[in-house]
Amino acid sequence: MLLLGIDVGTSSVKVSVIDAATTKIIASAQFPETEATIISKQTGWAEQDPETWWLYTKQAIQKINNSGIYNPDDIVSIGIAYQMHGLVVVDKNKQSLRPSIIWCDSRAVEIGNAAFNKLGADYCLGSLLNSPGNFTASKLSWVKQNEPEVYEKIDKIMLPGDFIALKLTGEISTSPSALSEGIFWDFTRDDIADKIISYYDFDKSLIPVVQPVFSVHGKITKDIAEQLKLKPGTPVAYKAGDQPNNALSLNVMKPGEIAATAGTSGVIYAVSNKLTYDQQSRVNSFAHVNYDSVAKSIGVLLCINGTGIMNRWVKDNAGKGLSYDDINQQAQAIALGSDGLTILPFGNGAERMLENKMPGAQISNLQLTLHSAAHLFRAVQEGIACAFKYGLDILRQNGIHPTVIRAGKANMFLSKLFTELFVNITGVPVELYENDGAAGAAIGAGIGAGVYKTAQEAFASYKPVSTTEPGGNATAYSEIYQRWKVYLEKSLD
């Protein structure tokens, strides 16, 4: 018995097939091999075409099913993970009307701020657990204000994963978790946030039918099954944003458990059983994958837009022809502190933890006769680790005090140097797991289809591949962070 997971990322679509009995990955594939394009027509804008996501999804599934490693007929359920907060709009014929306004797009910040001021902190924080900010509801309002001819044609709105499920099944649905990440969910009423709908003057019929995350959201149509070599009627039994899904893939399901990721963006994701919110909305609270009206499981999410994307930019521009392993080795040869070079990694849209400010990526104290490309490579990793520490301190202010953080051995956590910097600058041990967003979605599909009775059953044999504890030089790491923090705060004045 096999399970298929689809991870619709910003850079590519990855798919994995796992053995349901062992949860081990049998095969994985992605498309495209190079990083997908983000359309940016104006500063702070970021869009991608949903039809391109679908094309990539089909290519990835065809690639993996053609591998000959397994029999596609043995796939019994499909799960989808996706980049969070993106707005997809379709007409009555279920056709996309415009490119998706994705997670790192900043155009709706002021729209959300105005909504927060009008609706008030008591309602927004107490019921929505967030400011409307730059989330999906505010993006839809931007479309309504600036593209009324598009808005008039909208039949349904959805998140990126909902769109892929639509393409697979012909059905449109959503979940409390998806609606909460769009700031469409009222936690005190456990229902769609009517006050947001009313304030923005949306038609409530734009919201799809609401179902639990772990449920059948549709079944593969005959036509799509033939194209992709899947069985007709195979259920799509799980859909979740990439960060709740990453937490699921790390078995972060109980209050007090914490996950981290450092891909294009960086995230610390903590599970709470309280309706937790930050007074300044620097961190955000959403319904976790196992949220229901009884067990109000909340995922508290700290997001840093500029992490892996900053590391990639430095590699592409200062390390042409080098691999990530190459730049990690060069960075390792530079002394702790990068000989005074300090880098802020914030160059990928408004940063929520900085109250939606956009300081941009910055380099400080560059000495032309001292610093080399290797110094840049190290200073970037130190700067990203410092950004995580800054955000973690915000979580601590909100009552979250991790004793260990779980992360997948992927992206920047493939770097031994970065992992050591992260642990020593934050002061928190890190357990690394052989996890995968697509494999997590596959496990979710198994839970949603009833292959596993509980999440605990799915993760019964889950163990870390390594654990990194804080080492010596605590004073030196603290000095690096304090220098970085001073530079950040000056840049925000």
Image (cartoon, rainbow, N blue to C red):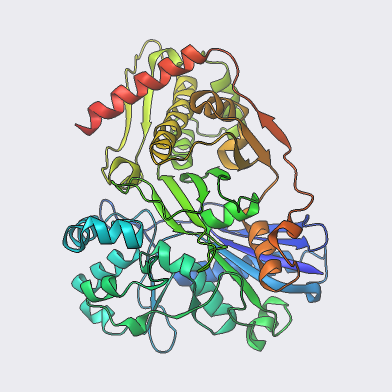
Q: Nearer the viewer, residue 463 or 70?
A: 463
> Which residue lies at the image location 71% right of the left edge and 67% below the top edge?
446
Rendering coords of residue 304 (x, y %): 41, 43
- Quadrant where the C terminus sits is top left
Tell me the quarter of the picture where residue 79 sits. bottom right
Residue 216 relative to residue 65: left or right = left
> Which residue lies at the image location 57% right of the left edge and 16% below the top edge?
333
Residue 244 can be seen, yes or no = yes
> Which residue lies at the image location 47% right of the left edge and 13% below the top edge?
476
> Which residue lies at the image location 82% right of the left edge and 65% below the top edge?
68
Residue 132 can be seen, yes or no = no
- Quadrant where the N terminus sits is bottom right
Furthest residue in direction top, as rendered = 369
Rendering coords of residue 387 (x, y %): 41, 33
Determine whether 115 is above or below 209 in the image: above
Residue 25 relative to residue 171: left or right = right
Rendering coords of residue 201 (x, y %): 22, 77
Q: Nearer the viewer, residue 93 or 286?
A: 286
